[in-house]
Amino acid sequence: MGKRRRVAERRKTNPAVLGGMIAVVVVGAGFGVYALYGGGASADERTSATADHKAVKTGPLTAAEVRTASTRFLTAWRQGRTAEAAAATDDPSAATALLTGYTKDAHLKDVTLTAGTATGAKVPFSVKATVSYQSLSKPLAYGSSLTVVRRPSDGKPLVNWHASVVHPDLKDGDTLVTGESGTPPVKALDRDGGELTTAEYPSLGTVLDGLREKYGKKAGGKAGVELRVVRGKASEAAKLSDKTLVELSKGTPGTVKTTLSPKLQAAAEKQVGKWPKASVVVLRPSTGEILAVANSGHGFNTAFQGSLAPGSTMKIVTATMLFEKGLVTPEASHPCPKKYKLAGWTFHNDADSEIKKGTFKLSFGASCNNAFINFAPKLSNSDLTKEAQEVYGLGLNNWAIGVPSFDGAVPVQSGAQMGASLIGQGGVRMNPLNMASVSATVESGVFRQPYLVAPTVDHRTLAKAARTMSSKTQAQLKDVMQYTAAYGTAAKAMSGLGPNYGAKTGSAEVDGQKKPNGWLTAYRGDLAAAGVVQAGGHGGDTAGPIVAALLKMGG
C-alpha cells in the first residue's frame, strides 16, 4: 500500500497518531481554568498600534499565553474538533490536512495526551494510543512537543505548526498510513551468509531499510501490515524515504546478500562508538565491494549520505590534477608560504606554519595548504571538477551501490572559492564512502564504483570513470601518500601498517564549530578506508585511529 522510498533515518521510539477517542491528561505547571481564560498581563507584554488603530501585542510571550494557546490546541485535538485545533495554529490548512488524516488513514484511536512543564514557549507532551487495523491492534507511545508563537498580524499566541508537532518523525508534507506495506521485508545477509540485524550492528538500521526499499519486492517476500511515515516531496528531495514505525504483522521476508564482512563490520561499530559523531567506510579496491559501514549516530547514514567538506583529504584529487598537468612532481622544490593572497582572500596554513625550502612531497605530507592554493593562477575554474569526475567518478550522481548514497560534489568555482576547493573547502562536499573510494582508486589505479549488493543481483549498471590515471601519476600519488603515512601527519595513526600503504589526513573548518571535522583516508594492500569525526579536531588524532584499526585487521 503506497510507494516506499529511500530511508535515511530510524529511531526506536514507538509512534502513534492522534484521532478517534482522545483523552487529555495535563500535568506540570498551571494547565487549568486560569490558563484557558488568561491571567493578567505581565510587565514584558507590549502593544503597538497599526494604521487603523488596532492594538497588536508584541514582545515575549507570557507563561499564561503559552499555557492558554497550547491548552486550547491540545483540548480541541483530544476532543476530535479538528477545525478548532487547526485554527489554534499558525497554518490551519496544513494542520487540518494532517490531523484529519490520522483517524482515517493511520487508524489510531484511544489517544491520551499528557502535557509536561513548559520551557519558555516550548511545551512537551507525551502520547499514548492504539493503532487498530482490521483484526490487528497494538499499543503505541511516543513523546512530542509544540512551540507557541505570536501571529504577526495581531500578536495572538498560536501553535507554530509543523508536522513534527504530532509525531517527531514526521517532516512537513509527510503523512501517516496504516495498512499493507508497499514493500515486503527482507533478510539481509553478510558476505558469509550470516544475518545482519540492528541488534548486533546498530549502525545498519538505515542500510537495512534501504535494502528493503530496493530489493523487498525483487527478493520474493510478502508484505506485512504496518504503521509508517509516507514521505512528501520535500522529504524525497532530501533523500528521506518511507519509514516503518510499527509492524502489526511481519509478513514474509525475502533474502538479499551483501558484501559486508561480519568481522570488519563489528570492528567498525566498535571504533565509531568511541566518538559522539563518527563515521567510517571500508572497501576493497580491487572490486569496489563495501566491507563495512558504521556511524556512531544511528538516525542518519553520514557514511553514505553525508555532505561534508573533506578538508585536506581532497588534496589527493588536487595532487592528481597537478601531476597530470605536469605542474609539479613529488621531488620538485616547492615552497609553502605562511600566507597567500588570492582574489582578495588571504589564506593561512595551520598554526601559520610555512615551508620555505622543501619538496612538494614534504608539503603534501605536512598538509601545508598554500603549497596547493598557490597553483590556482595556473588552473582553469573547471579543472578540479573535471579531475574529480573523469578520474575518480565523483560528483556525477550516478553511483548505484544498492542503497541511497551521495556521490560527492565538486562544483566549478572561481577566484578565492576555487582556491579553497583545492584544499577541500569552498563548495566541495564528500562523505567517508567517497573518500574511501578516492584512496581505493589510488591503490588500484582504476575507479571501481563501490557497491553493497553485487550488480548481478538486479542487473544494474555500475558507474564508470571517463578515463584512468597513468601509471606514472599513480606512482607519484602512492609516493606522496606513503610518505604521509610514514613521516607526515598520518604517521602516528598508521604506525606499523607499512610498507604497502598510503594515507592523507584532513581537518575541515565548519562555521559555528570550535573544533574542525577530522578526516583520514588511507589504503593498505587490498583495503581502503576513510573516516570522519565531526567537531573532533585534527584527522590524524581522531579519524586516524579508527581507520588504522580497521586496515590493520586485513580483509
Image (spheres, rainbow, N blue to C red):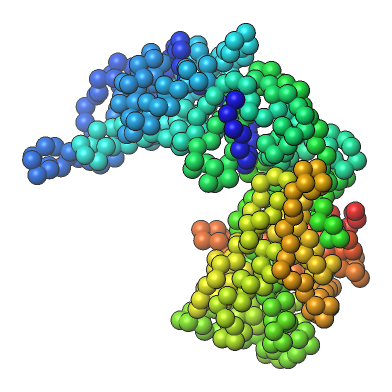
The answer to whether 259 appears left or right of 141 in the picture is: right
User: For residue 509, which quarter of the picture?
Assistant: bottom right
In-front residue for pair 60/147: 147
Residue 482, x across and y down, in percent? 83, 73
Query: Residue at (57%, 24%) from the top-left corner?
Result: 15
* Residue 354 vertical placement versus 413 (above, below): below
Query: Residue at (12%, 43%) from the top-left corner?
Result: 50
Query: Residue at (65%, 20%) from the top-left corner?
Result: 225
Residue 369, x across and y down, in percent? 63, 77
Query: Residue at (73%, 37%) from the top-left corner?
Result: 215
Residue 414, x across and y down, in percent? 51, 76
Q: Do we see residue 432 in this rendering?
A: no
The answer to whether 272 appears left or right of 534 in the picture is: right
User: For residue 403, which quarter of the picture?
Assistant: top right
* Residue 212 vertical placement versus 15 (above, below): below
Q: Do we see residue 526 in this rendering?
A: yes
